[in-house]
Image: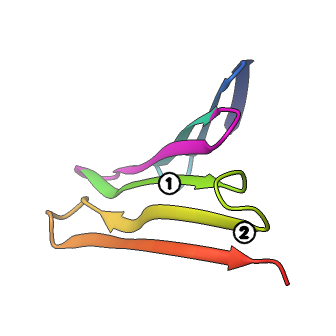
Amino acid sequence: VGANVKAVVAPVTVEAKADYAVFGKTVDTTTKVTYAAEKFSAYAKLEANMKFADEFAMTKIAAEVGVSSDKVISGATVSLGWTGADFAEGVEKKGKIAAQVKIAL
């Protein structure tokens, strides 16, 4: 069983998704907020997965954020993002921060 919702009030877009596996007794959720400005766009995303077996358990708490622009440098897209973090079992998996420039030739 699942549900998806998307709401847009420019310049903000909010997306949410939830899935429940009846026999697996799991709930998987994702929420993403995007801000689209004239010169850049930015987003924040959170995924949380839960298991309701004999005991409740958080099996995933993943967060990521990013910002990008193709307006700052002519002919290039620059971006900065934090991905790969999962705090379900502590703070050991902190993810990585990546900066990127793609240049059109």
Choose between 102 and 26: the one closer to the eye. 102
Q: Give the range drawn in magenta.
A: 36-56
Residue 73 image offset from top left, x and y in percent: 67, 61
Residue pictured at 15% horizontal, 64% vertical? 91
Q: Is residue 47 left or right of residue 6?
A: left
Q: Which disc, if any, is residue 66?
A: 1
User: Spatial distance from mark 2 to mark 1, Cα to Cα?
Assistant: 17 Å
The scheme the figure's colours follow is rainbow
- Asked whether the viewer can see residue 66, the reply is yes
Q: What count of labels does the image hold?
A: 2
Residue 7's quadrant in the figure? top right
**Residue furthest out toward the right:** 105
Q: Is residue 46 magenta?
A: yes
Residue 9 image offset from top left, x and y in percent: 70, 15
Q: Name the residue under label 2.
A: 76
Residue pictured at 61% horizontal, 75% vertical? 101
Please report whichever mark, 2 or 1, sits nearer to the chain's N-terminal start.
1
Residue pictured at 66% horizontal, 40% vertical? 39
- Asked whether the viewer can see residue 29, the reply is no
- Label 2 amino acid? Ala
Q: Is residue 100 magenta?
A: no
Q: Is mark 1 on a helix, strand or loop?
A: strand
Position of residue 92 relative to residue 14, above or below, is below
Q: Residues within 10 Å of mark 1 (few under 14, many from 20)?
A: some
**Residue furthest out toward the top:** 9
Choose between 91 and 89: the one closer to the eye. 91
Residue 17 image offset from top left, x and y in percent: 62, 38
Residue 31 image offset from top left, x and y in percent: 53, 38
